[in-house]
């Protein structure tokens, strides 16, 4: 078995480029992947990822082999992968290939950002050239990478961005680049003060009310005008920087002043009145978002940050936030990044007063659902211990459909995810077919095929009408095949009664999956059911648009690409797409309001 990725796919954030392992096993890669046979078993997204890893390797024969045999278009993520690794030659070749395939954007924005973040000036020179189009992306990357010299060079050469914009300080803060942050903050403060001063001058007669009044007005406007930027910058600092940096800048960026008691009183008054904060951001939402930034911080000092917030807000207000007792709170269920000490963080929050929202909460009152957010993170990353603690100690309760969706979209280790599934089953959670349909519709890739197979097998049909049940299973088949589910998943769905959708398999699947699907349809024809037939024009167009050249060639060689596919589909495709969209909208409408995150 050849290790190719530096980091398992499940641990790679979506905006991060793929990284090949170092040293790269170039000879072994070419020996195995330099022929067409191994690629036939890979779904589209796996082939795309393998191409990205080869692009990041800097090994020209590996990239040549991948480009020759991948049977797909060059994914936009390939160029950022090569750029992040600093491989100029690979970047040049991929840029030419993307241009030849007429990709809009070519992934240049992400590639420029990745190159600048890694400090690869030669790659930047190739990608940017004389143009100023992506220089802001390069500047953001330089901030995230902590490269002050590169930032200065970019500003001197292109002069197309202003480093006093808050997005640059946010980029540095989120990445924990405190040196860059401290260099940019004075520029940011100067811009905020200039904006406040300009507003005072524009007020005309109001500025003549006396020097003391004008000074007070300046302070007030200084706090009011940049609230949105201050809000997001403080969140970035809370998430990415050490606690000392948060302590140093909290008072200047927090909107409620310096006295915790007064802050709590002012906040409580606005909460009860339901008043929005400055620039339409509710102050309760500020509390929730800042707390979430601390909870999901990758820094080891996250607990010290939590203690600091408790000190600044006061125990009473912090307790209300943790218990979800503030009206107008930003209500959501979302997953955050997983940390090695995640269970310890959950226990620390429980000790600080975190509890589920009280039963009987009025439907019109949103609540911070912190335990649910943490449970979603635990499921997403396969942390059964944290989930069990939330369940047993916090008294957490969530609808089964939430669990189904989270499991379908999970990113954790297979064994951890299976442990979560077994825990849910032991606690009596039933997985219904309707919930499975919603979960499949929200997936963009299949992470763990073994987990999905077991989830399919554990699903309770519950449909009195067998025709309706078959339609639901077929829709799950279509959704999962479209995103590259392998033969084990498709076979499990087939066993539950799903009809085979040849087009969906061709869009996201492998040549071997197509062979399986064709055999299933031929066998169905022998039983008097719908059999194997050529794709329509709109279906062929979908395969072409997906860039799955390998499956398109397979269909064409067998006379199953009857509709052609050289163009994007016309009315037929639009009508079919609309019908699918309507089905998804109907499913979403049937979900309870608390599901909408």
Image: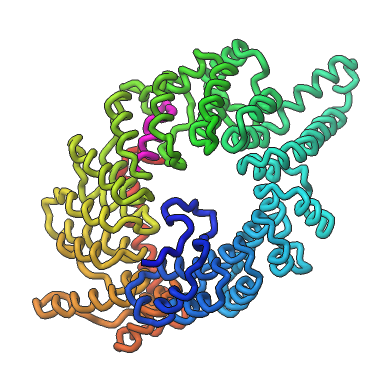
Q: Is residue 258 magenta?
A: no
Please name whichever residue, 455 or 214, is drawn nearer the observer in this view of the structure: 455
Query: Could you tell me residue 155's position as x and y percent?
Result: 81, 54
Tell me the quarter of the picture where residue 236 sits. top right
Q: What colour scheme was applied to this rendering of the protein?
A: rainbow
Q: Is residue 374 magenta?
A: yes
The structure residue drawn at horizontal position 36% and vertical position 66%, both measured from the top left corner, is: 1
The structure residue drawn at horizontal position 28% and vertical position 58%, both measured from the top left corner, is: 449
Q: Main secondary structure of the magenta part?
A: helix
Q: Quadrant of the C terminus?
A: top left
Task: Identify the residue at the far left of this view.
Answer: 527
184 to 218, vertically: above or below: below
Query: Could you tell me residue 481's position as x and y percent?
Result: 31, 65
Residue 395 in view of the camera: yes
Residue 570 in view of the camera: no
Query: Could you tell me residue 526's position as x and y percent?
Result: 10, 80
Tell me the quarter of the picture where residue 177 sits. top right
The structure residue drawn at horizontal position 54% and vertical position 55%, both measured from the top left corner, is: 16
Please name whichever residue, 366 or 298, is drawn nearer the observer in this view of the structure: 298
Tell me the quarter of the picture where residue 183 sits. top right
Please name whichever residue, 487 or 26, is drawn nearer the observer in this view of the structure: 26
548 to 346, vertically: above or below: below
The structure residue drawn at horizontal position 33% and vertical position 83%, both measured from the top left corner, is: 555
Q: Is residue 436 left or right of residue 588?
A: left
Q: Is residue 267 left or right of residue 319?
A: right
Query: Could you tell me residue 400's position as x and y percent?
Result: 26, 40
Please name whichever residue, 292 or 94, is drawn nearer the observer in this view of the structure: 94
Q: Which residues lie in the magenta part?
A: 364-379
Task: Identify the residue at the far top of this view.
Answer: 261
Q: Is residue 95 left or right of residue 426?
A: right
């Amino acid at each position: 078995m050849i290790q190719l990725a530096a980091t398992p796919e499940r641990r790679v954030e979506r905006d991060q480029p793929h990284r090949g392992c170092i040293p790269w096993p170039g000879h072994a890669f070419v020996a195995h992947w330099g022929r067409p046979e191994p690629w036939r078993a890979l779904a589209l997204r796996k082939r795309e990822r393998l191409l990205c890893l080869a692009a990041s390797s800097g090994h020209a024969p590996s990239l040549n082999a991948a480009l020759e045999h991948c049977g797909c278009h060059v994914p936009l993520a390939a160029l950022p992968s090569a750029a992040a690794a600093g491989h100029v030659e690979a970047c040049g070749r991929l840029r030419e290939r993307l241009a030849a395939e007429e990709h809009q954007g070519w992934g240049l924005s992400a590639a420029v950002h990745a190159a600048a973040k890694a400090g690869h000036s030669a790659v930047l020179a190739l990608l940017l050239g004389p143009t100023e189009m992506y220089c802001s992306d390069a500047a953001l990357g330089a901030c995230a990478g902590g490269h002050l010299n590169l930032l200065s060079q970019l500003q001197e050469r292109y002069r197309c961005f202003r480093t006093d914009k808050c997005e640059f300080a946010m980029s540095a803060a989120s990445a924990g680049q405190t040196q860059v942050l401290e260099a940019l903050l004075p520029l940011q403060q100067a811009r905020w003060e200039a904006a406040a001063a300009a507003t005072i001058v524009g007020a005309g007669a109001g500025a003549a009310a006396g020097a003391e009044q004008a000074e007070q007005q300046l302070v007030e406007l200084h706090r009011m005008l940049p609230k949105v930027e201050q809000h997001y910058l403080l969140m970035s600092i809370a998430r990415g920087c050490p606690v000392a940096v948060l302590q140093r800048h909290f008072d200047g960026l927090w909107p409620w002043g310096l006295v915790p008691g007064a802050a709590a009183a002012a906040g409580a008054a606005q909460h009860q009145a339901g008043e929005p904060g400055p620039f339409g951001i509710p102050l309760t939402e500020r509390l929730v978002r800042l707390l979430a930034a601390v909870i999901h911080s990758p820094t080891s000092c996250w607990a010290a940050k939590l203690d600091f917030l408790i000190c600044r807000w006061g125990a009473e207000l912090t307790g209300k936030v943790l218990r979800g007792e503030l009206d107008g709170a930003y209500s959501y269920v979302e997953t955050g990044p997983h940390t090695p000490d995640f269970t310890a963080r959950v226990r620390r929050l429980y000790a600080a007063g975190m509890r589920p929202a009280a039963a009987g909460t009025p439907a019109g009152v949103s609540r911070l659902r912190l335990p649910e957010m943490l449970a979603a993170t635990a499921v997403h990353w396969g942390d059964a211990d944290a989930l069990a603690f939330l369940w047993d100690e916090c008294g957490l309760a969530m609808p089964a459909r939430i669990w189904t969706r989270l499991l379908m979209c999970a990113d954790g280790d297979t064994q951890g995810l299976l442990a979560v599934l077994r825990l849910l089953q032991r606690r009596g959670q039933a997985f219904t077919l309707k919930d499975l349909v919603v979960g499949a519709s929200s997936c963009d890739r299949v992470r763990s095929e073994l987990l999905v197979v077991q989830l399919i097998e554990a699903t309770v049909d519950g449909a009195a009408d067998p025709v309706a049940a078959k339609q639901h299973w077929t829709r799950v088949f279509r959704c999962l095949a479209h995103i590259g589910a392998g033969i084990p998943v498709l076979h499990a769905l087939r066993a539950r009664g799903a009809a085979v959708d040849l087009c969906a398999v061709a869009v996201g699947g492998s040549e071997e999956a197509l062979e399986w699907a064709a055999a299933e349809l031929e066998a169905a024809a022998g039983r008097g059911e719908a059999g194997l037939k050529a794709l329509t024009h709109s279906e062929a167009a979908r395969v072409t648009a997906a860039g799955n050249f390998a499956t398109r060639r397979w269909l064409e060689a067998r006379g199953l690409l009857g509709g052609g596919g050289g163009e994007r589909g016309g009315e037929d495709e639009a009508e079919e797409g609309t019908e699918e969209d309507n089905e998804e909208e109907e499913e979403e409408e049937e979900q309870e309001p608390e599901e909408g995150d």
